[in-house]
Image (cartoon, rainbow, N blue to C red):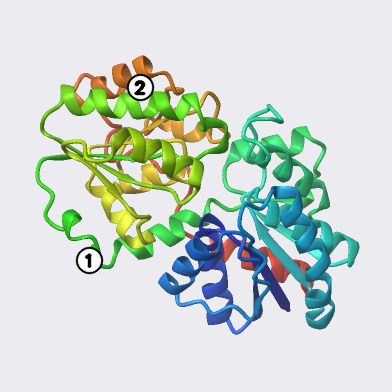
């Protein structure tokens, strides 16, 4: 069996790494092709997981649009696949890289495996363009690796037959278990000896640019004034639109630490150390049940309702008043986390093994 994985962003690298490492440990021929959709953040993750790409398309350009980037993938990836001629092409999630690579594989008549398939909000514009990216990959894929029972049900509702749906759990749990088992040293000395409670904040989603991000910043300031034992840590996303707003509103504020993007081990250990997380990230919703830290999701809708149902996540939108109210309930002790015995809705940490077993079963 010959596999090629194609990815280009930090979240994709995190969730593909357990599959790549397990495949190579099993002596399965595995080729890693990266698009470098997000160059710096991708390279950081490749170092964390000690993965060297076999093919680096290096397609990122400054101020690129999703369409421009997709066009470059469509132009450059076919030659790589014709050279490798894999039995399977694996993509993960809902990025422009994932959709464009899947479409190329379809044109080249290469079987597609879609890791983390079946997530849906039901609104094609939220998140944009991710919701349609993942919906379009599913019918192209020979195997859809659903991370949860609900994701599998979403696929069935769209007409994907059971024979093409495999329930695996989420590979992020595989990755997290390995990261949490090792100690970490923070490169920013301000994070080494934090005292008191930590409020961890991340904000980067495109639909939150502008006024929603302004409201998030106002909520951060209000919470800092209300809970004087809090240290607020905010890794600032490299997107210029995000940096400009956050720096203008939050730089040089007391007990607000604006830091450069953290390595994944640093971020995971900081999540575990935090009293509460505020985030508009999709991945953080999945990671919260594993690190056992509640997250308030600063979005109006989520494709990961399992996190909300588990009690580890709450949808709060981007209104300053709502964020402050919901966060205050957690920080004051009115709201508490689920019991330690509550199951992780995203699986048991063996997703990579299940994916490889499914791929091998079809090839044989």
Structural crowding at the residue carrying mark 1, measured as other residues with C-alpha within 10 Å and reported as few (<14), some (14–19) or many (≥20): few
Can residue 144 be seen in this snapshot?
no
Q: Nearer the viewer, residue 324 or 302?
A: 324
Residue 63 in the image: above or below residue 301: below
Can residue 232 be seen in this snapshot?
yes
Q: CA distance from mark 1 to mark 2?
A: 31 Å
Q: Identify residue for label 1.
A: 185
Describe residue 217's horizontal placement relative to residue 173 as left or right: left
Q: What element does badge 1 sit on? A: loop
Q: What element does badge 2 sit on? A: helix
Given contact means CB atoms under 8 Å apart, are the residues at marks 1 and 2 in contact? no
Structural crowding at the residue carrying mark 2, measured as other residues with C-alpha within 10 Å and reported as few (<14), some (14–19) or many (≥20): many
Q: Position of residue 209 (x, y in %)?
A: 52, 33
Task: Give the quadrant of the N terminus.
Answer: bottom right
Q: Residue at x 55, y 26 (%)?
A: 301
Describe residue 43's horizontal placement relative to residue 334 as left or right: right
Q: Position of residue 33 (x, y in %)?
A: 66, 73
Q: Position of residue 119 (x, y in %)?
A: 63, 39
Q: Identify residue for label 2.
A: 323
First-in-chain label (1 vs 2): 1
């Amino acid at each position: 069996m010959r596999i090629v994985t194609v990815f280009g962003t930090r979240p994709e690298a995190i969730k593909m790494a357990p599959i790549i490492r397990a495949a190579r440990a099993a002596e399965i021929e595995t080729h890693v092709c990266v698009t470098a959709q997000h160059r710096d953040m991708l390279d950081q993750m490749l170092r964390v997981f000690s993965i060297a790409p076999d093919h680096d398309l290096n397609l990122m350009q400054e101020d690129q649009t999703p369409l421009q980037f997709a066009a470059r993938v469509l132009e450059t990836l076919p030659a790589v696949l014709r050279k490798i001629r894999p039995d399977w092409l694996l993509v993960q999630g809902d990025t422009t890289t994932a959709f464009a690579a899947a479409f190329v594989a379809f044109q080249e008549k290469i079987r597609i495996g879609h890791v983390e398939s079946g997530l849906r909000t039901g609104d094609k514009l939220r998140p944009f363009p991710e919701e349609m990216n993942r919906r379009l990959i599913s019918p192209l894929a020979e195997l859809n690796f659903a991370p949860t029972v609900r994701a599998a049900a979403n696929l069935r509702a769209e007409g994907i037959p059971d024979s093409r749906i495999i329930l695996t759990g989420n590979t992020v749990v595989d990755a997290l278990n390995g990261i949490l088992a090792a100690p970490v040293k923070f490169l920013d000395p301000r994070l080494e000896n934090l005292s008191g409670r930590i409020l961890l904040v991340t904000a980067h989603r495109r639909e939150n640019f502008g006024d929603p991000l302004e409201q998030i910043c106002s909520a951060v300031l209000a919470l800092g004034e209300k809970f004087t034992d809090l240290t607020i840590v905010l890794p600032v996303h490299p997107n210029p639109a995000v940096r400009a707003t956050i720096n203008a509103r939050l730089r040089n504020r007391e007990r607000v630490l604006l830091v450069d993007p953290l390595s994944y081990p640093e971020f995971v250990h900081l999540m575990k150390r935090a009293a509460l997380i505020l985030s508009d990230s999709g991945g953080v919703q999945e990671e919260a049940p594993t690190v056992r830290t509640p997250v308030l999701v600063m979005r109006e809708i989520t494709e990961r309702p399992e996190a909300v149902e588990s009690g580890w996540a709450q949808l709060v939108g981007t209104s300053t008043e709502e964020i402050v109210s919901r966060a205050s309930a957690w920080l004051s002790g009115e709201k508490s986390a689920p019991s330690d015995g509550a199951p992780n809705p995203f699986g048991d940490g063996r997703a990579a093994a299940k994916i490889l077993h499914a791929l091998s079963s079809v090839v044989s």
